[in-house]
Amino acid sequence: MEVQFLPGVGPKRASLLRTELGVSTVGDLLRTYPFRYIDRSSVQRISDIQPGNALVQVLAQVVSAELTGKGAKQRLSVLVRDSSGEMELVFFKGIKYTYDRLKPGSVFLFFGRPSVFGGKLNMVHPEIDNPPTEGAVNFSGVLTGVYNSTDRLRNGGVTGKVMNKLVAEAIDLAIGDVEETLPEYVLKEKGLVPLKYAIRNIHFPADQNALSRARYRLKWEELFLLQLSLLKQKYIRSRSENGIMMPKVGAAFNACFNALPYELTSAQKRVIKEIRGDLMSGHQMNRLLQGDVGSGKTMVAVLSALIAVGNGYQACIMAPTEVLARQHFANIKKYLEPTGVRCELLIGSTTKGERRPIHEGLQDGSVGIIIGTHALIEDDVVFHNLGLAIIDEQHRFGVEQRSKLWSKGATQAPPHVLVMTATPIPRTLAMTFYGDLDVSVIDEMPPGRKPVKTMLIGEGKRPQMYSFIRREIAAGRQVFIVYPLIFESEKLDYQNLEAGYEEIVRRFPDPEYKVAIVHGQQTSEVKRFNMDAFASGRADILVSTTVIEVGVDVPNASIMVIENAERFGLAQLHQLRGRVGRGSEKSYCVLMHGLKVSKESRKRLELMCATENGFDLAEEDMKMRGPGDLEGTQQSGLPISLNIASLAHDGPILSDARSYAEHLLSKDPTLERPEHASLASELRKDKYSIKDYSKIS
Ligand code: ADP
Ligand code: MG
């Protein structure tokens, strides 16, 4: 039923509700929940108010209202009083409307955060409500819902009070038609309240307890349906797509494993077991491997690739940059020595002459493992039988590129896919974004890694920082200095980088010091030359953009200086910091902040100083900024927009709903049973039909 059928809603309001709140039907309105409640039973006396963080509500009479200033500087200050005292209310916006409304002598409820200004108690932009009137039908409960609103809604007459009225009418009219979405037995097992009860009480709570139960039920339902939808896709895929069977571990794996210079961590062992299980399952593997920088993902990649080779298939490892591909190649070749497996490198700068034997080796199967960049997915690269594709740092590859890789698989079945990322994603998000992938986590560092001391300093301390760098260089260490280059094309960023480089060269002059510079606009030869100079120890300082972000391993580097650190996201800072602390020396990460740094940025940088755990950082970052802004995910955006649950705050509910969804699908994977009909029909709705961007195959 269209909202327009509600009394008081004409075409104009109906269109406002649609454009501003996305509400078209009465059903939509019932599912538009308050984001906050006013407790009308608790009104404070002005004289009892303590300024601070707590929100308060006062019932007070307007004494006087005064307009001061002009134009943009205009403000409205209103003096109000109750029987205990007086306070000032201040408004900078909506001045005219508020001035007209707050007539001296009239009484209102004011709700807001009290503070003290010039020794006097005041409240800036409190919410204003009419006082409760005896017997008012629509305000039956003690708690009154407050709905999202916009200026256009308010100007169109859809005030908070009107929203309350409309929702009350919608409930009267349509609550009888609301159909339960969750099966009866699920409600029982999980102790959830019925949907009708939940909807009534989320809008007009009978009391605090009823509200909590309504809210829990609606959050659980939302997260459950989301997980059900994701997991159902996964079940369908794992049943329908057969994968290459790799039944044995093979001689190559054993040869490498037995020659390892160290013992695998138990996390590495667990993950390799999980991967092995997938490879021998007969279903295509689609696994995301998360592990902090330095947690030892490369070894997992090598051993997985060797399982493929041991079963007669080829494996490829695809890295996002040439520098990283090259470094992988150098590392991995060493591990492969005892196996006799042929491994090649294929990147953009591989010459035509070098390419021919590689292409031939891939085609005739004599190359067992190929490491490279995007060059691997060019059309002229043909595999004999690609069985496993490993992608390092997945968020840099688009879906299209991944599917191109897939098409290069052995003909009878798609290759298994392992995506590795060092960008920690909080568990709750991983469950949502990668809900249709299997996720493995290396949550343990190899022994012997030294903690990195992280410091936040401002411009004033720059001279001290330079002396510190000099001391470290004198002791034989090397230093990274990184400049933000968020958009490779931005001129200004290059100017910063170049100015920075010149300053460093001035401070650290040749021949006493050697400074190398690497950035994205250099040719790959120049880049390689400079990287090599640093990696081999010929250069003391490497000035660079974030091209070094992923992978680069220079154990002798002990200081990472990050300029304008506030311009980086936490995940990126964490990645950069992971470049040091790889050797035996104590290492440092120096976060330089610019002159203007917001409170929020400073808080994030302080968090960097406080913890080295990437997952904790990601978790905190999500709480501070909300999941929408989280790095590594913003390209994709949230898969659905949640109405009431929050990925940042409802982790426990999400976990519970997810395991219940798994349990239910294990009994009825296609939701065919009659008692699951309501679930199947919910999943057909737009909200839960998730676009399949995260599917990597
Ligand atoms: P990631 O790719 O996860 O950032 P790497 O695979 O590059 O980490 O490993 C980081 C360093 O730790 C490498 O020098 C590697 O040789 C070493 N390493 C890996 N696994 C172990 C282990 N189990 N014990 C000791 N050192 C290890
Ligand atoms: Mg790595």
Image (cartoon, rainbow, N blue to C red):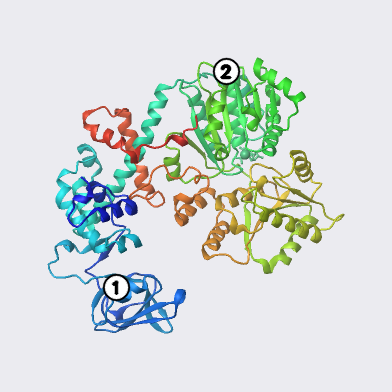
The residue at label 1 has a CB less than 8 Å from ligand 1 = no
Across and down, in percent, residue 302 comes to 62, 29
Element marked by disc 2: loop
Measuring 45% from the left and 42% from the top, which residue is drawn there? 430
The quarter of the image holding the N terminus is top left
Image side of residue 619 versus residue 468, left or right: left
Image side of residue 414 versus residue 179, left or right: right
Across and down, in percent, residue 17 comes to 29, 53
Residue on which the image places disc 2: 311
The reply to whether residue 443 is visible in this rendering is yes
Across and down, in percent, residue 298 comes to 62, 35
> Callout 1 environment at 10 Å: few (<14), some (14 to 19), or many (20+)?
many
Give 573 or 99, whichever is nearer the viewer: 99
Measuring 68% from the left and 42% from the top, which residue is drawn there? 552
Residue on which the image places disc 1: 110
- Name which residue type carries label 1: Phe
Q: Is 530 rendered above or below residue 228? A: below
For marks 1 and 2 on the same chain, the one whose residue lies earlier in the sequence: 1
Give 348 or 330, whichever is nearer the viewer: 348
> Callout 2 environment at 10 Å: few (<14), some (14 to 19), or many (20+)?
some
Give yes or no for contact between labels 1 and 2 (Cβ–Cβ under 8 Å): no
Work out which residue is located at the far front of the displayed protein and give it: 11
The reply to whether residue 482 is visible in this rendering is no
Picture quadrant of ligand 2: top right
Element marked by disc 1: strand
